[in-house]
Amino acid sequence: MFFHVQKLINEIVPDEPDPAAANALQEGLGGQFGEMRTMMQYLFQSFNFRGKAKPYLDLIQGVGIEEISHVELIATTINRLVDGAPGYKAKGGVFDAATQNMPGQNGSTPLNMALHQGNIHHFLVASQGAMPIDAAGNPWSGSYVYNSGNLTLDLIYNLMLEATGRLQKCRLYEMTDNKTARSTISYLIVRDHAHENVYAKALESLGVNWGKVLPIPNFDATKFPEVRTLMEKGIHNQQYHWRLDGSEMAKVFQGQAPSVTGGPLEVPEKPPEGVPFTPGPERPEEFSPGLTPEIMELVEQVSKLK
């Protein structure tokens, strides 16, 4: 079973809306090597795990549970990058008839931007929210999930998945200077580095010698200022276990990191603190949530119940 705290695993830095950056980030969410893929792949590997190699089960499952929070983080980031992009402003409230571009008033087109930037489905289908698709609009597919049942083979495939994800996120970082996008991209670059260490260390314990191969891409990631700040905190060498009843992950994830960045590996006893989560504002031009003042009164009454 899983437990939930309504916080984001990392802070999303505010910046201007950027629908094009949001669409690029869809690759990191619903692409073949995105966060939905890692989440589902590791969870299914843990659900289908066989045998008594419990430290490896705890290791795979611990990363899989973290990936749930990564799906939440990147989806929320896409929301922030798309939200408000049409520049809709209501003067005296969401249904103020005096607002010049109120939906349907005087032939106004408050969603006109959707025809020119990013992915039109962010506005046409999703009401300015994230979708389970890649940057080209292809839907996420369960056929991406790899679970052979062979522990060594699954670990090799997981390392490839993390390395490819990190490679793509480094490319995403170089596509946009939007602070909202970069805050999440940088965090995921560092965590993908950590997960490369996780699977590489597991394979190392099975006899693999990595030498100077890792991490992939193997470059000085501290050239990205946001990444450098996170690496200075050692986040690339930590892996949370998320267990309330004890974990054996540290039997595998210990010693020196198997990548050229080096440093001691750590399994913190507590999960990250997280940052407060606040739902996005109403989007009247999308009719979202589409509640009239009368219905809002009922919602407010429910919210006050103890």
Image (tube, rainbow, N blue to C red):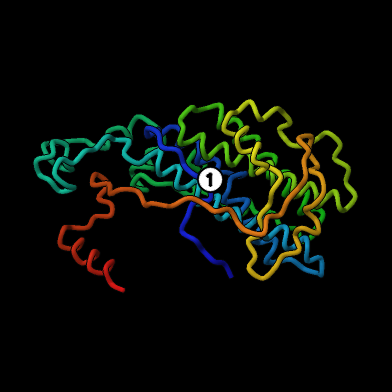
Residue in the image at 77% along x and 40% along y = 263
Give whichever of 150, 64 is nearer the camera: 64
Residue carrying label 1: 29
Residue in the image at 13% along x and 36% along y = 100
Taking 29 as reference, is 218 left or right?
right
* Residue 222 image position (x, y, % from top left): 65, 29
Residue 122 quadrant? top left
Q: Quadrant of the C terminus?
A: bottom left
Name, please, the residue furthest toward the bottom: 306
Badge 1 amino acid: Leu
* Residue 63 image position (x, y, % from top left): 66, 55
* Residue 137 image position (x, y, % from top left): 48, 41
Name, please, the residue furthest toward the right: 207
Q: Is residue 247 above or below residue 167?
A: below
Residue 17 quadrant? top left
Residue in the image at 10% along x and 44% along y = 97
Q: Residues within 10 Å of mark 1 (few under 14, many from 20)?
A: many
Q: Is residue 168 above or below residue 3?
A: above
Q: Quadrant of the N terminus?
A: bottom right
* Residue 266 image position (x, y, % from top left): 73, 51
Residue in the image at 47% along x and 47% along y = 75
Under circle 1, the secondary element is helix
Q: Is residue 46 above or below residue 25?
A: below
